[in-house]
Amino acid sequence: MTMTFNKYKKSVDNGLAGEKRFDKIAEARGCAVMEASKRDNMIRKIDRYVIDENGILKSVDVKIMKRTSRSDTSAQDKWIWVEFNNVNGNDGWLYGEADYIAFERQNNFTLVNRKELVKIAEELVDLKNTVSSSKLAKYKAYRRYGRSDLISMMELDKIIEMAEDCEIWYKN
């Protein structure tokens, strides 16, 4: 129990640190940033509200860099995980209410319009045939053992290429 809790706590702490890095970049761009309520975070899948330099309010779900499989030693920024269903089998963050999903990369945060991302993911990911290993989950549906989630990996550069509403916020 303690080991599982510590692993979960580390994941939560990493996510919160990523959100703080996002805040710093947004504020450096002249944006006002507000943390979403616990309810908005859990139910609506929104981490932050940002008022951009043009006065436009955007809701954002922040995603940190992830490993492609548990055996990888470090996170990478070429492939991103998308969540069609969460661990309980309900709609995943892809179907949340955020205006944008901000994917952390080594040198930037890439903000993609969530509704566009849904269309791109549903077009490119084969959801009919589920694979049994995360290593095979590139553009394929994957369910982790003992969970009801449905996730897949997509190449972030391909998403950027296809999305019309996409912004890159550099860290420097």
Image (tube, rainbow, N blue to C red):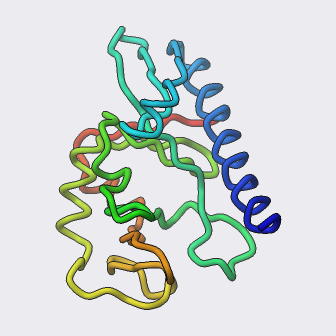
Give the residue drawn at x 20%, y 65%.
122
Image spot of residue 123 (x, y percent): 17, 67
**Which residue occupies the foreground of this view, 17 or 159?**
17
Say which quarter of the image contains residue 70.
Answer: bottom right
Question: Quick check: 68 left or right of 99?
Answer: right
Number of disc labels: 0
Residue 134 against residue 122 in the figure, above or below:
below
Q: Residue furthest front?
A: 1
Q: Quadrant of the C terminus?
A: top right
Give the residue drawn at x 46%, y 74%.
147
Give the residue drawn at x 48%, y 67%.
79
Say which quarter of the image contains residue 84.
Answer: bottom left
Q: Quadrant of the N terminus?
A: bottom right
Question: Quick check: 159 left or right of 75?
Answer: left
**Which residue occupies the foreground of this view, 50 or 42?**
42
Give the residue drawn at x 56%, y 36%.
170
Question: Quick check: 28 left or right of 50?
Answer: right
Residue 11 against residue 55 in the figure, above or below:
below
Say which quarter of the image contains residue 119.
Answer: bottom left
Residue 154 against residue 43 in the figure, above or below:
below
Image spot of residue 25 (x, y percent): 60, 28
**Which residue occupies the foreground of this view, 116 or 143?**
143
Q: Residue furthest bottom?
A: 132
Image spot of residue 46 (x, y percent): 43, 34
